[in-house]
Image: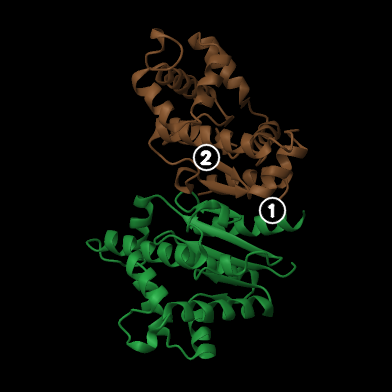
Chain colours: A green, B brown
Amino acid sequence: MSKQIITISREFGSGGRLIGRRLADDLGIPYYDKELLSRISEESGFSKEMMEEAEMKAKNSFFYSLSSAFGTGDSGPDSLSLNERFFLAQFDTIRKIADEGSCVIVGRCADYVLRGIPGATNIFIYAEKGDKIKRAVEEYNVPEKDVKKVMNDTDKARANYYNYHTGRKWGDPVNYNLCIDSGYISIDNIVKLIKDYLELKNER
Amino acid sequence: MSKQIITISREFGSGGRLIGRRLADDLGIPYYDKELLSRISEESGFSKEMMEEAEMKAKNSFFYSLSSAFGTGDSGPDSLSLNERFFLAQFDTIRKIADEGSCVIVGRCADYVLRGIPGATNIFIYAEKGDKIKRAVEEYNVPEKDVKKVMNDTDKARANYYNYHTGRKWGDPVNYNLCIDSGYISIDNIVKLIKDYLELKNER
């Protein structure tokens, strides 16, 4: 198979991360999720913890926009547009990784960063609320009493972070080549379907 | 293959109708698009033209809501909730058709009408604006000078009609099992992908 860059965007509880990992294993290509943060950290000098914190700050859209535009975060005067600097570091590393060869990248606006790059395929994994809650409790071990809040906060942060930096709308089909509801088909079969898609797309 | 009810929702210019037709032919099952209107017309007594006109009226969301709620359309005093009566006639006929056996149904809120019915698979076909314009001009023979307006009006009518009657958002992935951008993969291969999906879904 020719060079394949696959980005996976996913709602919390949809199993998107697992799908990405299995797909990368099946195709025998590198997988980047937390691995991406480590690499950005190596290349930019920002700590992983700082970046993760910045991403989660986005759950409040208003303050995220404010601190991105004016650097009025809680990290002192050096934080001028820190969010923007994180995003740019991420941008550079994702581009480099895609240059190196086939890979699967989960999250972090990779679909936007790699738009227009030949061979890039953008996938969105989502599900109905009940299915996501079930998976989060049973498979991610999120306590039942917290699951709705964790799900809402995580997806809100993802959406705001994405919308702010890309000017697009997170989860809008037009950003992705293929969107799959993981509530109706098993994880293993979603991986098969994506592999079928890659073959059929390349046949064009 | 067991009973398959496939609904296809589609943006104007995405090729969704053609995909539905080929899929039905390939699977050897009935296809309903204009055929659905004829059948609703037979069963309800409404004329096809009246129904098509009612659907296109939805391009103005405000007036559509008004005429649906209060029947203040331009068809005289008999139009009391005519839009609602059209929708209910459509609802009944779609349910009957799904009861009869496997089929492909294009448009007309069929995904919503058949929600929760075992064996129903809801698909959304979309594409980037440029790809849709190209297809509309080259394949649907829409004059280039009119294409943007026709596309906007048609999709606005579809969205308003859907949103009004279902309380959902047209084109939101969560209404569909699978969403496919037709700009990156040929129509024939989309049909193959949907057939793969049906097999993989049933394996569950």
Alpha carbon distance from label 1 to label 2: 20 Å
Q: Nearer the viewer, residue A18 or A8?
A: A8
Q: Do the residues at pointers 1 and 2 share their chain?
A: yes
Kind of residue at disc 2: Asn
The quadrant of the image that shows the N terminus of chain A is bottom right
Q: Nearer the viewer, mark 1 or mark 2?
A: 1
**Considering only vertical position in the picture, is A52 above or below B98?**
below
Residue on which disc 2 sits: B122
**Considering only vertical position in the picture, is A62 above or below A72?**
above
**Considering only vertical position in the picture, is B160 above or below B32?**
below
Residue A113: mark: none
Q: Nearer the viewer, residue B32 or B143?
A: B143
Secondary-structure class at tag 2 = strand
Kind of residue at disc 1: Tyr
**Considering only vertical position in the picture, is B37 above or below A66?**
above
How would you rate the neighbour count of disc 2 (Cα within 10 Å): few for under 14, some for 14-19, many for 20 or more? Answer: many
**Farthest residue, direction left:** A145
Identity of the residue drawn at 57% across and 34% down: B153
Q: Is residue B1 left or right of residue A77?
A: right
Residue on which disc 1 sits: B184
Estimate the x, y position of residue A160 in percent, counting from the top left.
Answer: 41, 64
Q: How many marks?
A: 2
Q: Nearer the viewer, residue B99 or B93?
A: B93
Secondary-structure class at tag 1 = loop
* Residue B72 occupies quadrant: top left
How would you rate the neighbour count of disc 1 (Cα within 10 Å): few for under 14, some for 14-19, many for 20 or more? Answer: some
> Is residue B11 visible in the rendered structure shown here?
yes
- Please tell me which of labels 1 and 2 falls first in the chain: 2
